[in-house]
Image: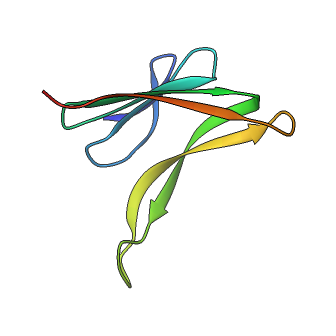
Amino acid sequence: MGVSRGGRASASAPGVGVGLAADGRGGRLQWDGHDLSWSMAGAAAVRVVSSSYHPRFWVSEPCVCIELEFAGALAETRLTWRPAR
């Protein structure tokens, strides 16, 4: 699965689907039947970008990050979780 905004794939992480809502203020993560929706309030911009993480020395794994650009002094993140069935 990959990252999408308006139906266009732009980045990916193994086994994880990341979608950015058309309004750019939220999105969805999906993996192994799990579903997590997220939304941001108080953000000037939200981006999903390619990155990497390092689970142990000398190992680099691809991932994606959700970046938030603050619009002011306060930002709120809401998560809605639906576990795999």
Vertical comparison of 68 with 7: above or below: below
Question: Closer to the camera, 11 or 81?
Answer: 81
Residue 17: image location, x then y, percent: 34, 34
Residue 66: image location, x then y, percent: 56, 42
- What residue lies at 29% left-to-right and 49% top-to-bottom? 14
Vertical comparison of 14 with 33: above or below: below
Query: Toward which corner of the image does residue 15 lie, by quadrant?
Result: top left
Vertical comparison of 32 with 14: above or below: above
- Left or right? Give the position of 34 relative to 4: left
Count every numbered label the image shows and give the total: 0
- What residue lies at 75% left-to-right and 40% top-to-bottom? 69
Q: Which residue in the rendered view is the most extreme toward the right?
A: 72
- What residue lies at 62% left-to-right and 36% top-to-bottom? 47
Q: Which residue in the rendered view is the most extreme toward the bottom?
A: 57
Image quarter (top left, top right, bottom left or bottom right) of the N terminus: top left
Question: Closer to the camera, 10 or 59?
Answer: 59
Query: Toward which corner of the image does residue 81 lie, by quadrant?
Result: top left
Colour mapping used in the image = rainbow
- Left or right? Give the position of 25 relative to 45: left
Image quarter (top left, top right, bottom left or bottom right) of the C terminus: top left
Question: Closer to the camera, 45 or 1?
Answer: 45
- What residue lies at 63% left-to-right and 23% top-to-bottom? 25
